[in-house]
Image (cartoon, grey):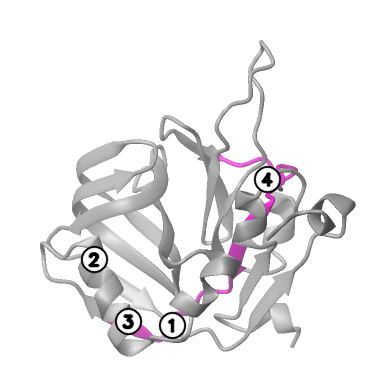
């Protein structure tokens, strides 16, 4: 079995600090994701409008081997297989634990739950069901149904992958979504997660990466 196909092993391309430092071009295309995972999140290259003005980069969420782009207004659509991501994390998601969350459970409480169970190990996770409130970087939603997928990242890994709950939301009809900032669970939502056994990191090979101060 190839390392990339082992369940819950995380494949990440580039460092989060490299992206924040300005390495926001290139990276693997969407078509590459299916070789490394069924679920994931990422950030696409920034695009320009007709006037040449750079637009905010779209976020990516991959659910059941299908990748969706999430634009600045929270509109979701299937991503083009050639679209590239200068930063992404994916895995073959096979949850090992399943927890029905009480209605009213907030983002902070889910983070505390992970901290008590898997303090030092990154974990892919999925929350499916109703949300009383869903706050994303792009928009705010009330009384919605959908899926949150992402990774709980331990504090030691902050410079590599970010920290805490790094996740995206996709509505049940797959028309809306965004990078998750906060939420409150509705009645009947389910949290599924697993511990990552191995973490694979791919490095950019261009001179721009080597010149960054990270």
What is the crowding at mark 4: few (fewer than 14 residues within 10 Å), some, or many (at least 20)?
few
Q: Position of residue 24 (x, y in %)?
A: 69, 44
The disc label shown at residue 178, or none? none
Q: Position of residue 154 (x, y in %)?
A: 45, 77
Q: Pointer 4: what residue?
A: 22
Q: Is residue 154 visible?
A: no
Asked if the residue under mark 4 is in contact with the one under mark 3, i.e. CB atoms within 8 Å, the reply is no
Q: Position of residue 212 (x, y in %)?
A: 75, 54
- Between marks 2 and 1, how big is the CA–CA gap? 19 Å
- Between marks 4 and 1, how big is the CA–CA gap? 32 Å
Indicate the secondary structure of the residue bearing disc 4: loop
What is the crowding at mark 3: few (fewer than 14 residues within 10 Å), some, or many (at least 20)?
some
- Between marks 2 and 3, how big is the CA–CA gap? 11 Å
The image quadrant of residue 91 is bottom right
Q: Pointer 2: what residue?
A: 108
- Between marks 4 and 2, how big is the CA–CA gap? 29 Å
Q: Which comes before the other along the chain, label 4 or label 1?
A: 4
Q: Position of residue 178 (x, y in %)?
A: 41, 44
Vertical position of residue 175 compared to residue 39: above or below: above
Vertical position of residue 142 compared to residue 204: above or below: above
Q: Nearer the viewer, mark 3 or mark 4?
A: 4
Q: Which comes before the other along the chain, label 1 or label 3?
A: 3
The disc label shown at residue 115, or none? 3
Q: Pointer 1: what residue?
A: 194
């Amino acid at each position: 079995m190839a390392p990339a196909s082992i369940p819950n092993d995380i494949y990440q391309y580039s460092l989060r600090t490299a992206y924040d430092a300005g390495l926001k071009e290139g990276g693997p295309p969407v078509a590459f994701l299916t070789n490394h995972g069924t679920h994931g999140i990422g950030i696409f290259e920034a695009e320009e409008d007709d006037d040449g003005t750079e637009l905010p980069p779209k976020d990516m969420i991959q659910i059941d081997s299908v990748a969706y782009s999430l634009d600045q207004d929270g509109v979701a659509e299937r991503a083009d297989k050639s679209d590239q991501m200068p930063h992404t994390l994916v895995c073959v998601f096979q949850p090992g634990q399943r927890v029905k969350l009480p209605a009213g459970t907030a983002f902070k409480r889910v983070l505390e739950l992970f901290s008590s169970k898997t303090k030092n190990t990154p974990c892919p996770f999925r929350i499916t069901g109703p949300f009383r409130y869903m706050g994303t970087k792009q928009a705010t939603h009330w009384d919605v149904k959908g899926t949150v997928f992402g990774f709980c990242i331990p504090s030691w890994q902050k410079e590599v992958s970010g920290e805490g709950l790094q996740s995206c939301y996709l509505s049940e009809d797959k028309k809306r979504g965004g990078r998750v900032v906060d939420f409150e669970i509705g009645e009947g939502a389910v949290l599924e997660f697993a511990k990552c056994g191995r973490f694979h990191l791919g490095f950019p090979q261009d001179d721009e990466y080597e010149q960054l101060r990270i």
